[in-house]
Image (cartoon, helix red, strand yellow):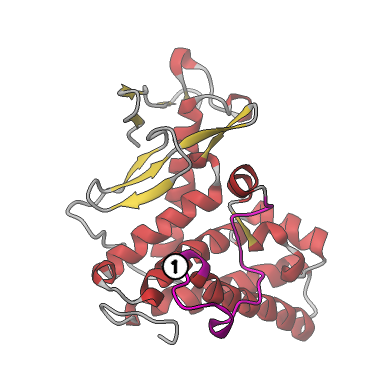
């Protein structure tokens, strides 16, 4: 984590691990717990912890089963929690980093580094770029859309693999993924602040290739594949409950685990350059 703001030229002091208390601390030794969410050091730990877990999940034997190769020299992905002011966040191969920005919305400041969906989405770009670096050379619209799909897939997978959140969602939705808007809605805070919608994109949609006009942008086009993936997730959860008569939380876990295996392992089988939705 390198907390450098390119707009102000300021480098924030890093969070420090206190061995005695077994906790991260900020300036002055303040413990970075749930009461310290306004601290930039809390933001640093948050984005690091989210992606440390995501990295472990992708490298697990049930997923890729090996270390992720980055598309740049070196073995560390740099995280920049407060890269500058703006409604933006992105993966940048040249600087080997994920860049997260912040902006004002009414009386509040929205930090993209605190949105798990946005953090995981950008990480998905970095993962796919490492596995298939030549996709960036393609002019095929579905290839660019596949990159965006990979980001949203990562956000959804990491949501349902969070044990506490998954059990809560299973309880309040009675095991119905199609009712779990927290799973299907991507970047809720960002969408509310920027577009006055309850999400930036949604996996619960009815887009098809034939319903979109030629020249549709990659973000919108990606929702065709994201919607199809979400339909599979819903069907997996429903089938598991019907066949095994297990509790909703167990069905949610089964569906998330199966989707992870189904979607992540075959990434190694993608063509090297032009990827389309049929692939």
Question: In the image, residue 224 lies at what x, y percent?
Answer: 55, 76
Identity of the residue drawn at 46% across and 78% down: 214
Range of magenta residues: 197-220
Which quadrant is home to the N terminus? top left
**Left or right side of 138 for 190:** right
Q: Nearer the viewer, residue 139 or 199?
A: 139
Q: Residue 217, can we see it?
A: yes
Tell me residue 107's x, y (percent).
Answer: 65, 26
278 lies above or below 86 = below
Residue at point 71% right, 72% down? Answer: 251
Q: Residues within 10 Å of mark 1 (few under 14, many from 20)?
A: some
Locate residue 161, reporting x and y percent.
58, 60
Which residue shows up at 73% across the image and 65% down it? 249
The residue that label 1 is drawn on is: 218
Q: Residue at x 30, y 64 (%)?
A: 129
Q: Find numbered disc 1 in the image and state the secondary structure of the residue it sits on.
A: helix
């Amino acid at each position: 984590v390198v907390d450098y703001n390119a707009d102000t030229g300021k480098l924030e002091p890093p969070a420090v691990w206190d061995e005695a208390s077994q906790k991260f601390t900020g300036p002055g030794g303040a413990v970075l717990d749930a009461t310290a969410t306004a601290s930039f050091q809390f933001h640093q730990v948050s984005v690091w912890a989210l992606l440390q877990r995501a990295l472990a999940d992708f490298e697990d034997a049930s997923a890729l089963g090996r270390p992720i190769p980055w598309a740049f020299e070196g073995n560390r992905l740099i995280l920049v929690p407060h890269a500058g002011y703006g409604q933006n966040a992105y993966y940048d191969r040249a600087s080997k980093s994920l860049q997260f920005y912040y902006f004002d919305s009414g009386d509040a400041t929205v930090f993209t580094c605190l949105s798990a969906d946005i953090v995981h989405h950008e990480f998905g770009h970095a993962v796919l770029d490492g596995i298939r670096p030549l996709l960036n050379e393609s002019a095929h619209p579905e290839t660019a859309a596949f990159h965006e799909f990979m980001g949203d897939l990562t956000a959804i997978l990491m949501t349902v693999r969070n044990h506490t959140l998954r059990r809560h969602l299973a309880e309040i939705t009675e095991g119905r993924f199609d009712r779990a808007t927290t799973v299907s809605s991507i970047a809720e805070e960002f969408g509310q602040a920027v577009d006055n919608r309850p999400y930036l994109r949604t996996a619960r949609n009815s887009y098809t290739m034939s319903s979109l006009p030629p020249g549709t942008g990659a973000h919108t086009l990606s929702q065709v594949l994201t919607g199809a993936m979400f339909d599979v997730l819903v069907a997996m959860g429903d089938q598991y409950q019907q066949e095994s008569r297990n509790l909703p939380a167990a069905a949610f876990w089964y569906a998330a685990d199966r989707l992870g295996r189904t979607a992540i392992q075959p990434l190694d089988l993608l063509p090297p350059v032009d990827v389309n939705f049929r692939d």
